[in-house]
Amino acid sequence: MPRLSNELLRHAFTINPLLPPLLRTCRTLPSAHNELRWLRQHVDARLETKFGRKKDVPAPLRRRCVVNLVKKRARGVPLQYILGSQPFGDLDILCRKGVLIPRQATEEYTYRLSSILLSTPSLRADQEQIRILDLCTGTGCIPLLLLSLLSPTLKTTVTGIDISPTALALARLNTTHNSPPLSSAHARFASGDVLASGPALLNEAHRAREDEGWYGDERFDVVTANPPYISRLGFNRDTERSVRNFEPRLALVPEEGRIGGGEKGRLEDIFYGRIVEKAEGVGAKILVMEVAGTEQAGRVARMVKVLLVLYDGGKHAEEFPELLGTTENELGIRKWLEDAGHTLVTTSDKDDPNSKFDQELVDAEVIITTPFHPGYLTKERLQKAKKLKLAITAGIGSDHVDLNAANVTNGGITVAEVTGSNVVSVAEHVIMTILVLVRNFVPAHEQVAAGNWDVAAVAKNEYDLENKVVGTVAVGRIGTRVLKRLKAFDCKELLYFDYQPLSPEVEKEIGCRRVENLEEMLAQCDVVTINCPLHEKTRGLFNKELISKMKPGAWLVNTARGAIVVKEDVAEALKSGHLRGYGGDVWFPQPAPKDHPLRYAQNPWGGGNAMVPHMSGTSIDAQKRYADGTKAILDSYLSGREDYRPEDLIVHKGDYATKAYGDRAKK
């Protein structure tokens, strides 16, 4: 701020010695003249009330009072705090320290809003009545002016919400101070926390109204929110000195720690997400929010809440930042999202009815989860997710989503996955598991790790893969790669069962043969590997009956989905020796409970279990691929291009985009 010239100060002093101190805050002589006049009028009114008549007021007392107020104003104390009020439309709004002072711009858009509401009946649920909710109400100036402007024409009720008891007391005082024209029967002020997620604020508002004998419902036509929330830097750099020194900082700058732990974006922008949440919760057709400038307005307009459900990595994620699929490393997308103004909420808590997943899904626009720690999107959960538009699987396999429900929810939720991101990883894991089972590796390693040495004990259940018949259930991207890798082991025969046959050229290249009947294939195979998606026709496919059709002493590998097998039936077949071994990395549910039968099941010879956590598709290399693919899908959505790779889409625009999933509702 430029220094005042000595010439201006001398000139002001010659006019009135009280003007130079006022110039420190007013900066211009006409403004200083006006403020001095207002201060004198304020002193005269106060003293006349005390002494009865102006001529009875002692002149030295009057001057001393004026000088004290000038000194106060020279220190930067806002004039409204000194005078005690501020004109706002046709109202006289009382002002007190600790509550923000109404601004002219706020008054202007309040008039504009009233004009829109009067001229557009379709914006009101009731043609003769309008309900207004004002968040962060402060002095109550916005709802009270709207009540004054609208009530002559419409039956108007206003509710103001604020967390500050001082503000609520002042807002109620302003109602009576301006009565008439205002009626306290149509204006209510209640305590509530705008920064709280979920419906708690609105319940509080509703409860307050009932306690005061006003039994309106919780629906509002209009929601207003003032003042703007700004960053700490913006507060220190851009606001006036009087605002920084005397007006309540927490009314403009959100306090650290006031937002949930999963939200680490710009605190000042997250505030607006909360406002939108409240407005949608009460069914408002108009939402008016004041922002701090065009840059913030742009961020708010583009703001999307993304919910990310991953497994915890703990110290391992800290030591290895390449573990992108963990809550700590968040697929590497947090900074990218927050720089664009979006909100990212990350959690691993997904199983309990009141989990973080359930709480945050309610207002999320995008949900990202993985097959390795899936957030199950049931029909019931989707029905509560009123804003959800996109569900991304960071990896392959979207069976954790009720796809039929996704097609009919919110006009059709797009479900996409990163096709191909971990097919190599899973195929390699299948080969490894086959070898671990056939060569009886796990018991042999456990023996030496325990300090023992008994070759016969482990060799009795060890075989060669060469000259064995191996079959795969499905030959999609993973199944085909498994067969190609098995070719090098000189198996007796490679078989596959799939509704869609491979081309003759591919069959010849691999040296495999299609079997049209699943039971027929199982009866021939020494090793069977499951590589099909989970849907209505494959859920519980490998039950007691089907397993009995398998060749006695066969090995079964499952890296597809845990629910494709009936876990109790597999455990029993393994215990009896009908299955010589079972291995894989998929469970149902996930994470597997400690008493899951496939954690401990063994064959009669003390082995045959090659189960591990769901890890086949989440190698370090795979995590990089599916993190990149997730970001690409997100970018396509957030940019508005929606130019998704066709192979990534599972359901889109209310219909299935792939034949891979059989759970289709009849149209």
Image (cartoon, rainbow, N blue to C red):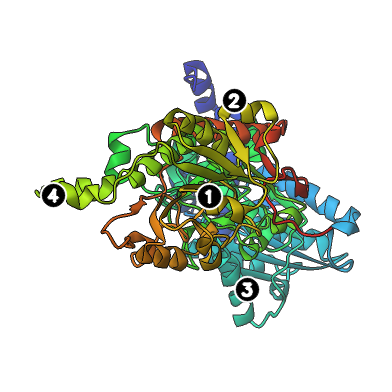
Task: Verify CB contact (< 8 Å) between mark 4 and mark 2.
Answer: no
Nearest to viewer (mark 3 / mark 1) = 1
Residue drawn at 63 percent across, 63 percent down: 160
In the image, residue 462 above or below residue 232: below
Q: Amino acid at mark 4?
A: Asp
Residue in front for this viewpoint, 526 or 128: 526
Q: Amino acid at mark 2?
A: Glu
Q: CA distance from mark 4 to mark 1?
A: 33 Å
Is residue 331 among what the camera can see?
yes
Task: Identify the element where label 2 is drawn.
Answer: helix
498 with respect to 434 (left or right):
right
Nearest to viewer (mark 4 / mark 3) = 4
Where is residue 242? Give x, y as percent: 48, 39
Residue drawn at 53 percent across, 38 percent down: 494
Residue holding disc 3: 206
Task: Identify the element where label 3 is drawn.
Answer: helix
Q: CA distance from mark 3 to mark 2?
A: 71 Å
Residue holding disc 1: 524
Sequence-first disc among 3 and 2? 3
17 with respect to 285 (left or right):
left
Quarter the C terminus occupies: bottom right
Task: Identify the element where label 4 is drawn.
Answer: loop
Task: Verify CB contact (< 8 Å) between mark 4 and mark 1.
Answer: no
Sequence-first disc among 4 and 2? 4
Is residue 83 among what the camera can see?
no
Residue holding disc 2: 509
Residue holding disc 4: 454
Task: Verify CB contact (< 8 Å) between mark 1 and mark 2.
Answer: no
Nearest to viewer (mark 1 / mark 2) = 1
Residue drawn at 35 percent across, 65 percent down: 575
Residue drawn at 50 percent across, 50 percent down: 251
